[in-house]
Image (cartoon, rainbow, N blue to C red):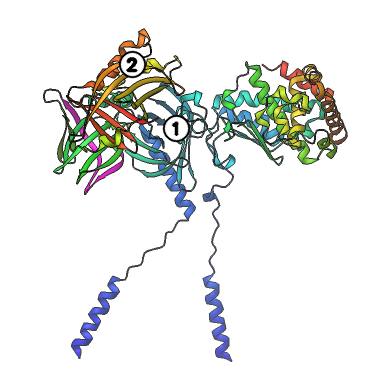
Amino acid sequence: MKKLLICLIVLSVLMVGCTKEEKLNIEDLRLGGDTWVKTELDNWLDEHFTVPYNIQVKYKWDRSEVNMDKTLVPPLESKVKPVMEAMEHVWIKPYVAVKGETFMKVMSQKQFVLVGSPEYNSNGTIVLGQAEGGKKVTLFVVNNFEKSNKVEVKRMLKTMHHEFGHILHQKKMFTPAYALITPDGYDATWFNYEDDEVLELGFISAYARNTVEDDFVEMLAIMLTDGKTAFEARVNSAGPGTAALRAKEAIIRSYLKETWDIDLDQLQTVTQEAINSLK
Amino acid sequence: MKRIYFLLLTVIICLSGCNKFEPTPVDTTDKRINETLDRYNSILADAEFGWKAYLLTNTDVAVDFTFKFDGKNRVSMNAEFDNQRSESSYRVKALQRPTLLFDTYSTLHKLSDPTPSVLGGALGEGYAADFEFAIVSATTDKVVLEGTFNKSQLVLVKAKSQNEIDETYNNTGTMLEKMAKVRTYFKRTVINGGDYELKIDNGNRKIDFIQYIDGVRKTTSGNFFVVDNDLNFFEPIVLGKDSLSSLDEITYDAGAGYIKCKLGTQELKISEANEPLFYDKTAVSRFWQADRQLSFTPWVMDNVVDYLNDASITAGTGVNQRIAWLGYDEDLDLIAYGANFSLRYGIGITPTIDKSSGMLKYDVYGILGTLPTVYRNIIIQTALNFTDPKGLYVIETGANTFDLVTATDARRWISLGPL
């Protein structure tokens, strides 16, 4: 018995002796994402997007953020600030003016990914923007952005309002009645038509025919970026399509009001003022 | 018995002496990765004058650059197609392999830009170049990289002076001029006692080494870049037992009319030849078939591509096809210009095929349609080049592609292929 006890003691002493504390060195893992020597641009983006809205603006190349099969290029550094200034001025600020900062802090996606070129599809179309589950918005063709080129500025802003429209309806869907207004007009080969050709079918743009959701956000984006006057003129020129466009407009108006307590007219006016004052 | 014990003891000692324990690495994988990245970072940044850089895209476009890395994620660069230095950012990052990323747009990205209006290339693809490169090997003098997306190749060679950086593109230009001085289509050299015919494509910076083994043409090709007076292959060229990674100290001997260079310790001569090393007399039968339409590229003379400025005919005139219509009519071939498969004008030439010698001869027959006055001389000379008194060699360069070479001096040639 004694022997057994001694054996046990020796064994336990030995085992204790074997305990070795390994320190986990997490520094080597370089967690916390990519690091680089920060530039003035990085600081500006932090100050205007990351700190106030918790939005990361990813402009440095990371293939895992984009379509792996496509040839794409990163943006020119010199274009990043102008594009993001426009985003802040014409997308964030109008919503903040109408709904307050908290709304944008909650609703905005958490990441911008900027791409220099468009993404070319095999059917001859190009991708200008993408929204993924309210988390990420990818903006393409950043390298062509010129603040003085109003057409290009509006195109980029329309892309953003289009993608943010997706985020809104991805959080809370609009009424299924919307899909019943022009149920036969949706067509995956939308790119074979010009914008003006589809008006009489009750669509605001050719791309609106892609899906019901795209129809919804195209309407919203065009109402906001073109402004009330231009939108009215466009709808009134739609001939047989006018009624459908009016019905869609009414649903969007009530969706914004009832779901998000946003007054469409007010948002439209504020956005137009922002576009016109963009320098 | 004692002996046996003694022997056993010796064997045991010997065996135990052989026992070698490799210590397991003390550091973690992450630590070693970080050390490697830091080492690559300092190799790049420590080049005081920067790097001469040679890119070969996956579509075989070779372009020279110069880079200067500052160690703080900033790189300045220019390229032979854009001499203006510009600054952008880079990172050395552990992806599947240690990788050098040019992570914001720069001159280098223009080759990858999918929009053709930027620098050409295919829509949606550019030149199949890269701006994200895995580091294959790195020393303080040379870094070899491979594109992660398109597998383009990039070689960085450390510059020893500012002058070297400034002369990067001139060196390439001078070398290409030198290589063009061997005027004939057939260029010959001897490597380790074996005869080779060379085809030097300055446009794509590519050399074909052509061997004839039992009359069968075997072509081995390699794309090159130029460092000083040396011509380096992106990948070594294997010719039998020989492996060529570079041709060094290239000079042109004007008196003797040949290029001299070194292949290891061997001295090579690349000289002019009026005739092929081996002539496949049957090629003419595969080339000339009645009522066959081929396209042709403009004549080359003394390595000068389109020396007649034939390109002016297709520039903005609506004419977009050069058609060689063999057997257009009985005893009549046509060298013609067309627009969308409709003939505009051309010159008829009558062929004579000598199957025993494999030579093709032509006489001018007459003009088809009305030749525009401004292009008249170009078109007439294009047709006249077919009428070499000694005829034309027909060289089969690939499936349905042929070169015709003037037999008198082999200094003019034309390429034909599917329309």
Q: Most extreme residue toward the top, as rendered?
A: B373
Mark 2 or 1: the one toward you: 2
Q: Tell me the subunit letter for badge 1.
A: B
Q: Most extreme residue toward the left, as rendered?
A: B255
Label 2–label 1 contact, CB within 8 A: no
Which range of residues does the magenta coloring cover? B234-255
Label 1: how many Cα within 10 Å (few below 14, some 14–19, many 20+): many
Quadrant assignment, res B357? top left
Quadrant assignment, res B259? top left
Q: Is B133 or B372 nearer to us in this picture?
A: B372
Residue B212 placement (x, y as % from top left): 21, 42
Secondary structure of the residue carrying numbered label 1: loop
Secondary structure of the residue carrying numbered label 2: loop
Residue that numbered label 1 is attached to: B127
Residue that numbered label 2 is attached to: B309
Going 80% across and 22% down the picture, which residue do you hit?
Answer: A268
**Mark 2: which amino acid?**
Asn
Quadrant assignment, res A237? top right
Residue A124 placement (x, y as % from top left): 58, 31
- Main SS category, magenta section: strand
Judge whether residue B344 is colored magenta.
no
Residue A121 placement (x, y as % from top left): 58, 35
Above or below residue B318? Residue B397 is below
Residue A148 placement (x, y as % from top left): 62, 15
Label 2: how many Cα within 10 Å (few below 14, some 14–19, many 20+): few
Q: CA distance from mark 2 to mark 1?
A: 26 Å
Residue B163 visible in the shown view: no
Q: Quadrant of the C terminus of chain B?
A: top left
**Mark 1: which amino acid?**
Tyr
Q: Earlier in the sequence, mark 2 or mark 1?
A: 1
Q: Is A184 or B71 nearer to us in this picture?
A: A184
Above or below residue A70? Residue A278 is above
